[in-house]
Image: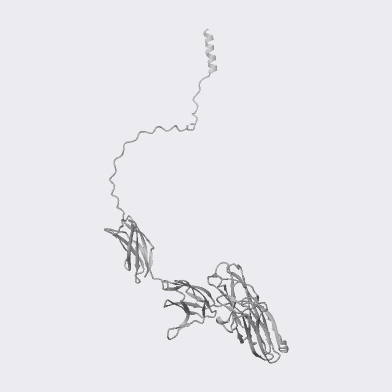
Amino acid sequence: MQFGHALWILSMATLVGCKGDDGPAGEAGPPGDEGPAGDVGPQGDQGPAGEPGEDASPPVPAVSAVFPGAAAQGETLTVTVLGTDTAWDETTEIDFGDGVTVEDVVVGSGSWLSATVTVADDAADGPRDVVATTGDETTQPAVFQVTDAPPDIQVDLSALVAGQWAHVAVEARDEVFNQFTTLEFCDSYDEDGACVPSMWVATSTPVTNDARHLSLLVKVDLYAPAGTVDLVVHANGDDWTLPLDLSETTPTVLPENDLQSASIEVENGFDAYEFTAGTVGNYTIQIIPSDPDRFSPHIEIFDPFFGGLFGIREIWGESTTLTVTAAPTTYDIVVIDDPNDGRIGGGEGYTYGVQLSSSGFPDITPDVEDDGSASIPASIVEAGEVDYYRLVPTADVTLDLAVAPGADPATALTDSILYLYDDAFVEIAYVDDNFEDGSEELLGQALTAGSTYYVAVSGYVDFFFGFSATGDYILNVTRP
């Protein structure tokens, strides 16, 4: 039995085996999730009281705003004054400084009042303090500006340019304009101080818009020299003189048969060109506006034989071509926006093309002298157009030249002008004395055999009112 017991022990030892040494420790695992927050602990004891604060500053009364904030010397006006932390009442006084008299004060509330003030003519210009006083209360000041007095009369431009059409506005400080107001441009003054009217400036009749505003249209001669010119206004028994600078214009050469691009960039602006006629003939200037709804072109050609305002040929409004007959010399052209269309040209949309071309013109043949008469029907189509005819007598002759209106009264030329020139384009005769039916006559014109003469017919043009006669006519050439 002991032997069996020993075997059982041996068997168990074999099955269990002997215990070995401990192995190395494993790596630590990741931390677990954070546990829930614990309960809030009880409130701690209250800390000690702080030091006592200082007393707050009391509000300071002040003038916070003044409307309007400025006035001119000599002006009387009502000024509104607002306050902050003020207690204004009927005893409140308001002070605008030296030279400003307070006529009346109306207090609307403790922080609002109005004052009627008059600024003396000699009050110092610049800022000054406005202070309100009520009993012992004096406000912090606000600023009020005194400005120089506006002139009695002022004009909306300071200079004129040769060749310019300008819309001019004249403004008076007081109500002085009426239907008897006149004005003039003066180059100088005689020994008695009377105006010597400028030969370079012409004007429309001034329009009295109201008692303080006038408007007019001014035309400056293209050949006016640099200098000054006075605009003198006569109104309500007084005279005012407004000097204006006058500057020259140098035209740009316009080549023949070459379309040029241009623009009128400034208000009341214009462009000036010149061309030289190589031979006697018709020359046509065409204007092609990029936007006809905005830019309605007006063209002028200055005749060097007359020069100045008396040598202008022109068209108005929607017409875009102007034809003249030129001798071999240099002519000047001005392009502007139509001054009568209610717009003042200049700026975006006032671009255009301009082109010069030339051609001959119709002849009155020598047959006139052989059979004794010629009757030529024709028409003035464009505003400012002039028709020219060449006449070369084969013998010395005396002729009558006459313009008659066309047969149809509805389309007849209503006001014509008749000219006669020699071969150098020097005017021999001119007539424009019938304003009723378009008829004109140059009688008993003695012409020399073999010489060249030019007969011209045009419609009457009014510079300032945009009127230019057009229509059908008959040119009659007869022996008396």
Could one spot residue 50 in this view of the protein? Answer: yes
* Residue 367 coordinates in the image, percent (x, y): 72, 87
Q: Is residue 421 visible?
A: no
Looking at the picture, tell me which residue is in the foreground, 225 or 34: 225
Does residue 182 sit above or below 94 in this rendering? below
In this rendered view, identify the residue nearer to me: 95 or 182. Answer: 182
Q: Give 130 or 111, whichever is nearer the viewer.
A: 111
User: In the picture, residue 445 is in which quadrant?
Assistant: bottom right
Residue positioned most to the bottom: 396
Q: Position of residue 304 (x, y in %)?
A: 58, 83
Q: Residue at x 67, y 83 (%)?
A: 475
* Number of on-image labels: 0
Image point (50%, 79%), residue name: 226
Image x and y of residue 360, in percent: 68, 80
Q: Is residue 15 left or right of residue 277?
A: left
74 vs 7, left or right, is: left
Q: Estimate the x, y position of residue 321 in percent, counting from the top left.
A: 63, 74
Left or right, 379 with respect to 75, comes to right
Quarter location, residue 86: bottom left
Q: Residue furthest top?
A: 1
Q: Is residue 265 above or below residue 82?
A: below
Quarter of the figure with the C terminus: bottom right
356 versus 190 height, above or below: above
Colour mode? one colour
Is 137 positioned to the left or the right of 297 in the image?
left
Residue at x 58% of width, y 82% of height? 311
